[in-house]
């Protein structure tokens, strides 16, 4: 008689194990969705083009220049002070050089080839919180007349 009482326990254990494994199928750690892309913001006023988007990357204002090609200029102003850090996201091969003019002039060489965008970080000393305007110039040729 003891066999009949204990015979349902392994079957119950097997059912619980199967149902818990089925439930885990919905919660596998690698099935998490990717983080959503950052939301565009409007921290600085941009004149010269509408193709530049702005995003926050922690305490860094990211200015996305990946839509720009060839030669051009733009300027940025702010009414409430500049963020602690500025960086520019560029797409290799779209232009050769990015010049940034603020307290200091900084020239970045943009890679000619590559599939992934490149981040160019502006040194904190290149501008101050009360800088009136930051101007950029991108050019297809590697020589800047300024």
Image (spheres, rainbow, N blue to C red):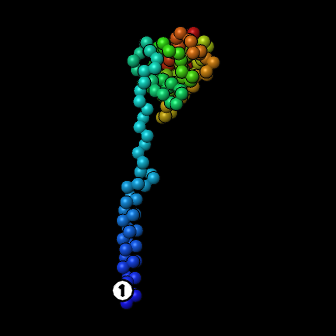
* Left or right side of 4 for 144: right
Q: Residues within 10 Å of mark 1 (few under 14, many from 20)?
A: few
Q: SS at mark 1?
A: helix
- Return the residue nearer the eye: 109 or 51: 51
41 w.r.t. 115: above or below = above
In the image: residue 101, left or right of residue 1: right
Where in the figure is residue 99, as x and y percent of width and height?
55, 16
For image coordinates 57% across by 15% down, the residue present is 129
Assign the N terminus to one quadrant of the image. bottom left
Vertical side of 18 occupied by 103: above or below: above
Viewer can see residue 144: no
- Is residue 25 visible in the rendered image? The answer is yes
- Residue drawn at the location 43% of the way across and 40% of the way down: 35
Q: Quadrant of the C terminus?
A: top right
Q: Quadrant of residue 52?
A: top left
Where is residue 77 drawn, in percent x and y?
48, 13
Which residue is labeled 1 in the image? 4
Q: Residue at x 53, y 15 (%)?
A: 81
* Quarter assignment of residue 66: top left
């Amino acid at each position: 008689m003891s066999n009949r009482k204990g015979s349902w326990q392994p079957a119950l254990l097997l059912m619980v194990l199967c149902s818990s494994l089925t439930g885990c199928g919905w919660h596998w750690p690698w099935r998490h969705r990717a983080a959503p892309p950052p939301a565009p913001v409007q921290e600085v006023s941009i004149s010269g083009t509408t193709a530049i988007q702005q995003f926050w990357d922690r305490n860094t204002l990211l200015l996305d220049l990946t839509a720009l090609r060839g030669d051009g200029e733009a300027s940025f102003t702010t009414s409430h002070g500049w963020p602690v850090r500025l960086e520019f996201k560029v797409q290799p091969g779209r232009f050769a050089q990015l010049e940034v003019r603020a307290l200091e002039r900084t020239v970045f060489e943009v890679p000619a080839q590559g599939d992934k965008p490149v981040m160019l970080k502006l040194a904190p000393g290149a501008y101050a919180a009360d800088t009136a305007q930051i101007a950029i110039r991108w050019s297809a040729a590697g020589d800047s007349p300024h």
